[in-house]
Amino acid sequence: MAINIILLIALLLASLWTVMTIRLIRSVVGLAITSAILSIIMFKLDAPLAAVFELSVCAGLISVIFVTTISFTQRLTQERLKLRRKERMGKFWYLPLIICTAAILLSFWRPSLNFQFPAPLKETDARNILWNMRHLDLLGQVIVLLAGAFGVVILFKEEKR
Amino acid sequence: MNPELMRMFWPFAVFVIFLFIMGTYCIMATFNLIRALIGVEILVKAATLLILLVGHVSGNGALAQTFVITLIVIEVVLMVVAGGVVLCLFRHNRTIDTRKLNNLKG
Amino acid sequence: MPSLLILLPLSFLIILNLPFRDILQRASFWVVAFFCLFQSIAVALHPFIFWSALPDPYGPFFSFRLSVDNLSLILLFSIGLVSFVSLVISRYTLLDNKQRFNFLNLLLIIVIGMNATVMVTDLFSLYVFLEVTSLSSFILISLKKDKLALEGAFKYIILSITATLAMLSAIALFLLISGDTSFVAIYGALGNPQHVFFSKLAIGLFICGLLVKSGIIPFHGWLPDAYSSSPNSVSVLLAGIVTKVSGVYVLMRMVVSVFGLNQALQDILMFLGCLSIVLGALAALGQTDFKRMLSYSSISQIGYIVLALGCGSSLAIAGAAFHILNHAIFKSLLFANATAVEEKTGNGSIEGLGGLAAKMPFTGITSLAAFLSTAGIPPFSGFWSKFIIVLALWQAGQYTYASIALLASVLTLAYFLILQRNVFFGKVASGLEGVREVRVGLIFPQVLLAVLTLGIGLFAPFFLSNFILAAGNILK
């Protein structure tokens, strides 16, 4: 349990850094670290397949997408960076305050957690569930990927000028 | 039901709530399109953790895992499309600051 | 057989993207048109094709546990119809061949998404197909890569993802209390008094997400931008059916067959519905852009549907379903009129126009039909659905809401009179003397929809007793 709490606190700090840091590129790195920590937590929660997905797709692919977008769009000079730093400090230091307030409030409040769960599924292999019971979701994934392919074709093509 | 697992639920749930707060704050407070997308990503992470946690606690870990795999696939496609829209916006306006992009009013 | 409506467009989609691009690009229009008409006609004849009685004949992998009831049949019919209209309009407005081919493919994808959304019986699959629908609508909005369209698309993306994430958290909570995500399991678990707090939280989150997606007034920020800035054929699709399926229909399905109505939920839905009706109509009064005015009018009409849903009697649900169908018909018709006007005058503003009814007789007359139907004037079909909704409200003892719904029709009449006077009536404005009627291809969908709204209105008793009132039976 202690290791879980440490991991969760690390997750919180990483995402806090993601939100509060000034340069976008560092923010993306923070997001990748958040994903990596999350995938360790997933592994601890007995979800190895999803952890692999999270690590490769979210920490890897999504960072690549963000870095590509940023490298196309951002050109920050030094003086603009200083300006940005000032206005961000004014805006973002509320966030740790909000988190602390929420933590204090939540520590006072314990919802009653005596659930009666129905019997869980007998099948415990995620692959079997995915292929035998949730194949409509699989079909949905295929269609989402197709839509994404058309999105790439339409959006990423440079106009001829 | 397993009381050991139930004791695990609340601390995790608190951190999920923190992640939701952070993501929402990031979307609300920023003027940068890409940072808004990063806020969305943090929200997605929170939802992912919540689903897995719930599956683990209620003994449906495998089902939750299939949900998370589907969610990750959808998420990455969404981010690609959103990134494409941001790129196109930048090509038109040479900026990704929302304060300079107010041609449409609600 | 219901899975046919998912598998058939999917196989068309795959076939269209095989090699031999040239032939397939030319055939693509007819293939998609065939599918849309097939869907509408097959659904309209539903008693004769045994929809859910026949087991799926393609092996266990393709049996998806879908279900079709009377409400979904009405929606499936509207999906086919509006997609067909949007398709015909795209043939004459999207002139670039490649762009049109992409549009056709995305249209097939969005139709798959909507058909599946209408028929699934599992909450997580519902989420997946909602994402399919909204993802393809993001791409469709930014199809032409206009500056304004991209901004509208980005706003829609952020709000829609936030909404679906709220829904996803709700799904996680449902998984916690019921151990599964099928509608039946959740319905069973919600009755358990032990999980009151979590079930209320989950229902609240889910409904908030759906209200954002349907564009009810406090959550409507994205809707006018997305509708008015997207390409014309996409506006027809979005306003006519996409937000109705992904927002309003899912709300109806959830409230009626999963969550169940209680007093608090009823009050919230009726209040928000009424707010949308009045504020949407007032906002429409002040618009100067044709499509933007129609978007606010759309918000106002969604308000009627949500108001009827909040009333919750069997008659009110039937009225809501009928109003979805009518809205699909007359709003697509109005957007088709807007397309025709924009094609001929070059921009979407309604200022500086006038007298177009003389120059464009078909557009003028059909827009008059659409606007009378929207305002609820007999004998057009819009009259009947509004009449049923008001009647149901009156029967349920909600006299205030019933009278607000009646009086708001006057507001509807007001903004459409402004529109008609500015665009179609009066003297021909300077610079528009040379305007002619649009080509036959663009007249055809307008006339088709106008005939439908008039026909349904004239034969309303027949339609009501055979199709519409049956939709109220989905109440448990």
Image (spheres, helix red, strand yellow):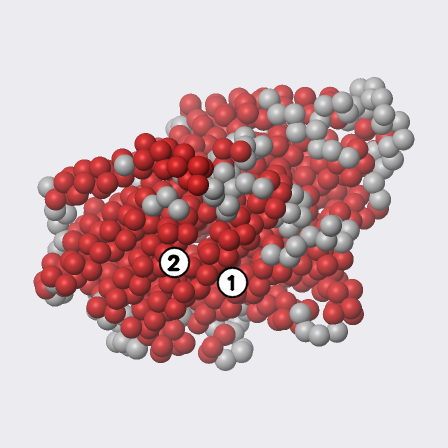
Chain under numbered label 2? C
Left or right of residue A84: residue C86: right
Amino acid, disc 2 = Leu
Q: Looking at the picture, how far across and down is residue C259, in whole percent? A: 33, 49
Distance between the alpha carbons at the discs numbered 2 and 1: 17 Å
Q: Residues within 10 Å of mark 1 (few under 14, many from 20)?
A: many
- Residue that lies at the very extreme toward the top in this rendered image: C427
Callouts 2 and 1 in the same chain: no
Tag 1 residue: A144
Amino acid, disc 1 = Val
Residue at the image point whose x is 24% and y is 61% from the top: B53
**Disc 2 on helix, strand or loop?**
helix
Viewer-nearest of discs 2 and 1: 1
Residue B94 visible, this angle: yes
Residue C123, numbered label = 2
Nearer the observer, C301 or C282: C282
